[in-house]
Amino acid sequence: MLDLPLIWALILAIGVMLYVVLDGFDLGVGILTGRARSDEERNMMTATVEPVWDGNETWLIIGGGGLFAAFPTAYAILMPAFYLPILVMLAALIFRGVAFEFRHKAVRPVTRRFWNAAFFGGSFAAALSQGVILGAFVQGVAVEDGVFAGRPFDWLTPFSLLVGVSVATGYILLGAGWLYLKTEGELQRRARGWARAALIVLAACFLAVSLATLSVNEQVVQRWGFSMTEIRPAVLIPLLPIPLAGMVLCGLLWRALSASPGQAKGHDAWPFLITIGIFLSGYLGLAVSLLPFIVPYQVTIHEAAARDNALAFMLVGAVIMLPVILAYTAYVYRLFWGKVQPGDGYHD
């Protein structure tokens, strides 16, 4: 007998991770456009994401729609808890999309500066909002009788803001790794500097978030077997490979970024790929902390799931459509692979 709630939880987890990686790097590139020295440099940066950024957001729709369809109880609890940051995120993504198109149409310098700032601001606001939502999710929500029982601003805490800054920094690192992969010359060298700076900040943020998470809920402490006052080796040691992998990958990324561009010809993809590995290690650590809860510390995957017949019916559609989406995504990335050159990008 298939465990359909668990299968759907895995589908949603994979969809969310794909969104974080794919839309994360183009949000990171959007944030880094604020560091561009000229319109030409900014256009080269946006040209690296222009063919793929719309498709990247598909995974956000799959995650939200899948949560609504497969885990309606969780959706009914979490949406009211995070209405405000979700609305800010969606507004930022919409405004960013408009700015992406309008900045190329702007004729007057003041208008062009406005839309460039809007593209940067929308990217940063979306990244920060996603991190705040994640932080609020990890710290848990108030639930009574199966419904959200908290206040409108329960999501706004020092912990959620710390996670928000961490996620935005991680997206900047992804974006810098993508620019390092897709560009050459001066812009590639600048991308390496941005990546090194972001890595330092991200490593500090990850350490702070990891320690802060232990104080969020006693169940997290029990799951890891580690707190400021107690260590249970039998629980902690089997889980140590996850944080250790993140630390090793940070060291490998620093080493990959230490070589001057061109010294490791053919290996420009390594910083981007290693950064994905860092995100995966953090994602696995999050899974260890939260599973089997889909509403942290309140409602489990099986308690929140729809009926098995509904899950089975939707699974048929997912088995058909997800490979199609993955194949299309792979095709687009393969089609537009390679370095961007001056003059590439948007054309009327």
Image: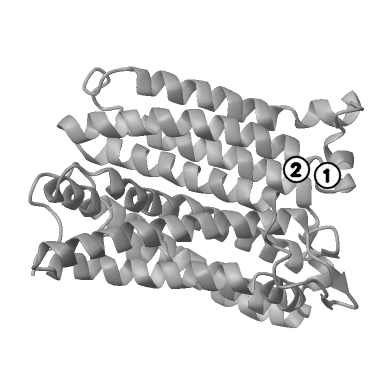
Residue at (71, 73) in percent of width and height: 152
Q: Position of residue 270 (x, y in %)?
A: 38, 30
Whole-angstrom CA distance, mark 2 to mark 1, is 7 Å
- Quadrant for the C terminus in the image: bottom left
Which mark sits nearer the N-terminus, 2 or 1?
2
| Residue 91 percent coordinates (x, y) | 45, 73
Q: Is residue 255 above or below residue 107?
A: above
Mark drawn on residue 213: 2
* Residue type for callout 2: Thr
- Secondary element at tag 2: helix
- Quadrant in the picture for residue 49: bottom left
Q: Secondary structure at mark 1?
A: helix
Q: Quadrant of residue 72?
A: bottom right
Residue type beneath disc 1:
Val
Q: Nearer the viewer, mark 2 or mark 1?
A: 2
Res 319 seen here: no
Position of 154 with respect to 107 (left or right) is right
- Cβ atoms under marks 2 and 1 closer than 8 Å: yes
Residue for badge 1:
220
